């Protein structure tokens, strides 16, 4: 009925009900794009022959691998331990002020690790604020060493646990409460129902969050460099900086990529074959909040401790610097142009990332096959590659093959696409898994073609996922430092590069102004969506 | 015969070596209500989804109004088939009101701003007229502004039916449409749906595992088992002359009595019953009798004994074990209750020629 072919025209005929060619073409384009840096790394690394292999089998490379693995495993485990109970407390219980906690606990995500690590050192380092506070009354002259593993673990955990928290919260909010009720009716306690039903159903959300945390830790540069803990990224940076020897840097990047592939493989194994969209009729009822009783107090203390260390302390230290700067009348010359540059380039990049995520997510969820799974997995590799590696490969690619693009924001946006595609794909995948394929079939049976169905059914239903994924990506891009430094056109200053140059020249007050501006601006969309989510779930 | 709207020939479908549908051939006439009946996993839903275009057959062909929509060379996508589908879970679009759900399948009207284009205004009017027409038809015009989750199960069912009917499909496919409704409501909705379908005269294929539903609604019933069609016939024929013992057992309660043939009669433990034409086999025969076709009297030393009774109010269903170990069922009006263990004399309560089977096949 919707189409115009009443009698004359023949219906379009295709052999089988596979994915639409437009979808396939778009996904293939994305695949080629994300393959570029990897291919460059491979050519530069393996192509250089004996020197490369020698580097790989040195003892120092092994040490780097062990240190990186230790940090990734510890950070991921710590993030899950903090995030899952938090997510449950703020979505399913009668915790006082749970909407406020839900917002506050997600906020540490807006603090870049280079700011976070510096604040940890200022607070807990030798001659830091804590030590000086304890020296007077108690005569404490030395605190336990913060540099190295403990500092890196502390910083990365406090700043990246929201990667697990946000998907877990979203999944808990959308989960059909009748499943838990069924478990309770079968004689299980609330705890047992959580462990046997809720937790397994949360697994895809936790796994995708844990994957993000693990890859983020692996590719983080800010925290490990300031904490002087030599993992891959710092080693690569030292190599690149000290000798300008791109072959060795590329070699280490390749090992890092293999490492990331290993993590991806491990996550694939945790995915079960169960489907997660709701199959019952009608819409989900909101869950009946569980009464905490006397447990309310330890729960509150838990939330408060996390918020204190991950948000309140860093922000007050930062605020103190800014206040001191204002009192001293120090001016920050380029604040507004840096804000504008950051917002515009990040905003454009977010749209590009979301547009590229949609075909990948649709293919992997709706047309599962080895090829589409590989494509979806492959998008994550860009996230594991440190920004510096992607940036170096694009510098090479740009100067060699696309001089017109070299030193333009277009190339920078492309680097962001490679780096942050997994954030977009992850968010869309989670939302798509909750959209029943019956809705799409209903659309098809009512005379709408596959692309029409994506436009009229999937996109509106995906809107919460698109907004959530978009704000997360925005935040990540605002914070990104190494690629922005290397690929940004000459004279192009964003908030991130301004913080970096100010703090490396020890203009700490100026750095504090930029840092505060970055945190405030990048968190706006995040706060808006969380407030809206909470408000709607009322 | 009236015009055939849907014709399946030799339809087969397997999933990685597991055969779901095997050589299914079926013709549905214009305006007919065909019910595909079978146990879960028999392939009935797969057959329906092939008709809709959500699955493509491995072999065989499907014709809609004389046009081939699926065979070895062609595959028409679902949106080009002009079929309506009512899903088991209704699949109402959760982000659209009832009204917009129903309008979804109609030619879209661009709505940017107020238009003076008379054509567009005509289309807009046509659209809203059709929407309220079908909503009125299913009796939920007053709910048009509601969101799907604000409707009861029965109302969602009607909305889904309205949405499928709105574009005037050549055929309507319904996948277990009543299975999500409670029993009392189910009967009511079933009656309403049957009335609505006959009002619109739409050709309908309905899939169910509920035999009572199939017999009450269908013009013809197609009974499926393990991917194959066992019988396609009117409800009366399917019930009274099942083509196989599987069908006999699936569409109702069936008692079987071993029988021998002689001189125009089949002789069983419950007595003789007429048989005009001699069967192709003379041994290994079984006569099928429905519970209402047998009766009994209390009788010391009779050939049967009551083993269980199931009280249904107006009538009671007795299970009887015969001397030779055969089990039969007998339905009696509840005028008197017979205790279990009562010895009884069983006899036929009908004069009609009862169906007779050899190795599970009607002979």
Image (cartoon, coloured by chain):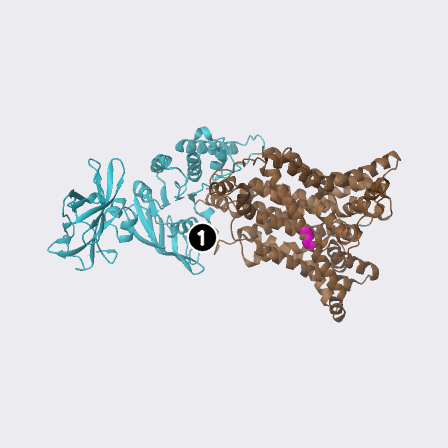
Residue A277 spot, x, y in % from top left: 52, 45
- Classed neighbour count for the residue bearing mark 1: other residues with Cα under 10 Å, few (<14), some (14–19), many (≥20): some
Residue B16 spot, x, y in % from top left: 45, 60
Residue B332: in magenta span: no
Residue closest to the far bottom: A50
Relative to the observer, which residue lies in front, B83 or A249? A249
Question: Could you tell whether B101 is left or right of A135 in the image?
Answer: left
For the C terminus of chain A, the quadrant is top right
Which residue is tagged 1?
B55
| Secondary structure found at label 1 | loop
Q: Colour of chain B?
A: cyan
Chain under callout 1: B
Relative to the observer, which residue lies in front, A384 or A226? A226
Residue A73: in magenta span: yes
**Chief SS of the magenta region:** helix
**Chain with brown colouring:** A
Task: Report whether residue B95 is seen.
Answer: yes
Residue A349 spot, x, y in % from top left: 70, 46
- Tell me what residue is drawn at x 64 percent, y 34 percent: A99
Question: Could you tell whether A26 is left or right of A483 in the image?
Answer: left
Task: Report whether residue B4 is seen.
Answer: no
Question: Could you tell whether A421 is left or right of B186 in the image?
Answer: right
**Part of the protein shown in magenta:** A72-76
């Amino acid at each position: 009925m919707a189409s115009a072919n009443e009698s004359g025209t023949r219906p379009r005929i295709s052999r089988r009900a596979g994915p639409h060619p437009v979808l396939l073409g778009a996904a293939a384009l994305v695949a080629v794009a994300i393959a570029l840096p990897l291919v460059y790394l491979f050519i530069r690394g393996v192509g250089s022959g004996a020197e490369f292999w020698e580097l790989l089998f040195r003892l120092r490379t092994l040490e780097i691998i062990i240190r990186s693995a230790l940090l990734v495993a510890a950070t991921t485990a710590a993030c899950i331990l903090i995030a899952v109970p938090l997510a449950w407390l703020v979505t399913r219980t009668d915790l006082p002020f749970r909407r406020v906690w839900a917002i506050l606990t997600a906020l540490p995500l807006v603090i870049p690790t280079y700011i976070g690590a510096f604040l940890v050192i200022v607070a807990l380092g030798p001659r830091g604020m804590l030590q000086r506070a304890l020296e007077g009354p108690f005569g404490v002259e030395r605190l336990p060493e913060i540099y190295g593993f403990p500092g890196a673990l502390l910083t990365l955990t406090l700043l990246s646990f929201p990667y697990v928290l946000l998907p877990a919260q979203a999944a808990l909010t959308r989960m059909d409460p009748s499943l838990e009720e069924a478990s309770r009716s079968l004689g299980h306690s609330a705890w047992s129902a959580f462990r046997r039903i809720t937790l397994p159903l949360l697994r895809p959300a936790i796994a995708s969050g844990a994957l993000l945390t693990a890859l983020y830790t692996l590719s983080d540069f800010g925290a490990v460099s300031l904490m002087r803990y030599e993992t891959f990224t710092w080693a690569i940076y030292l190599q690149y900086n000290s000798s300008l020897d791109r072959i060795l840097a590329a070699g280490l990047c390749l090992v890092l990529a293999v490492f990331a592939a290993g993590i991806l493989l491990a996550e694939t194994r945790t995915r079960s074959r169960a489907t997660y969209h709701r199959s019952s009729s009608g819409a989900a009822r909101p869950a009946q909040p569980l009464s905490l009783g006397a447990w309310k107090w330890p729960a509150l203390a838990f939330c408060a401790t996390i918020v204190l260390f991950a948000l309140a302390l860093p922000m007050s230290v930062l605020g103190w610097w800014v206040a001191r700067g204002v009192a001293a009348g120090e001016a920050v010359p380029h604040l507004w142009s840096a804000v504008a540059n950051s917002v515009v380039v990040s905003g454009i990049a977010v749209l590009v990332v979301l547009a590229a995520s949609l075909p990948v997510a649709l293919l992997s969820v709706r047309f599962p096959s080895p090829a589409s799974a590989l494509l979806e997995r492959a998008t994550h590799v860009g996230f594991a590659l440190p920004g510096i590696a992607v940036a170096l490969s694009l510098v090479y690619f740009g100067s060699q093959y696309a001089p017109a693009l070299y030193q333009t924001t277009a190339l920078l946006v492309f680097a962001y696409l490679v780096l942050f595609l997994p954030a977009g794909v992850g968010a869309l995948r989670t939302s798509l898994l909750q959209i029943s394929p019956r809705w799409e079939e209903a659309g098809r049976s009512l005379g709408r073609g596959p692309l029409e169905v994506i436009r009229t059914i999937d996109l509106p239903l995906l809107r919460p996922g698109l907004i959530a994924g978009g704000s997360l990506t925005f935040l990540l891009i605002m914070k990104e430092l190494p690629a922005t430094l290397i690929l940004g056109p000459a004279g192009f200053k964003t908030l991130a590069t301004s913080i970096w140059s100010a703090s490396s020249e020890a203009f700490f007050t100026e750095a504090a102004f930029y840092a505060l501006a970055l945190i405030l601006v990048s968190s706006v969309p995040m706060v808006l969506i969380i407030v809206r989510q909470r408000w709607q779930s009322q | 015969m009236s015009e055939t709207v849907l014709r399946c020939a030799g339809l087969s479908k397997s999933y990685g070596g597991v055969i779901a549908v095997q050589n299914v051939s079926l013709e549905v006439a214009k305006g007919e209500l065909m019910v595909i009946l079978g146990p879960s996993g028999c392939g009935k839903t797969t057959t329906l989804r092939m008709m809709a275009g959500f699955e493509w057959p491995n072999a065989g062909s499907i014709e809609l109004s004389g046009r081939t929509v699926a065979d070895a060379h062609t595959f028409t996508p679902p949106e080009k088939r002009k079929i309506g589908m009512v899903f088991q879970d209704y699949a109402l679009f959760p982000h659209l009101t009832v009204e917009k759900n129903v309008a979804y399948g109609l030619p879209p009207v661009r709505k940017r701003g107020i238009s003076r284009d008379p054509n567009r205004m005509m289309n807009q009017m046509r659209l809203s007229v059709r929407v309220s027409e079908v909503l009125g038809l299913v009796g939920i015009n007053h709910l048009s502004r509601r969101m799907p989750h604000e409707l009861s199960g029965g109302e969602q069912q009607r909305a889904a039916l309205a949405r499928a009917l709105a574009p005037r499909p050549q055929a309507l496919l319904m996948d277990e449409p009543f299975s999500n409704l409670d029993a009392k409501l189910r009967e009511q909705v079933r009656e309403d749906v049957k009335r609505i379908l006959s009002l619109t005269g739409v050709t309908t294929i309905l899939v169910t595992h509920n035999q009572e539903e199939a017999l009450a609604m269908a013009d013809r019933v197609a009974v499926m088992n393990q991917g194959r069609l066992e019988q396609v016939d009117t409800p009366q024929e399917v019930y009274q002359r099942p083509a196989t013992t599987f069908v006999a057992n699936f569409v109702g309660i069936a008692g079987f009595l071993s029988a021998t043939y002689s001189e125009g009669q089949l002789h069983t433990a419950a007595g003789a019953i007429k048989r005009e034409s001699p069967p192709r086999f003379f041994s290994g025969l079984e006569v099928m009798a429905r519970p209402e076709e047998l009766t009994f009297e209390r009788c010391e030393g009779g050939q049967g004994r009551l083993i269980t009774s199931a009280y249904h109010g107006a009538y009671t269903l007795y299970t009887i074990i015969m001397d030779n170990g055969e089990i039969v069922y007998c339905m009696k009006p509840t005028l008197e209750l017979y205790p279990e263990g009562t010895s009884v004399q069983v006899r036929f309560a009908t004069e009609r020629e009862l169906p007779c089977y050899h190795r599970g096949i009607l002979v």
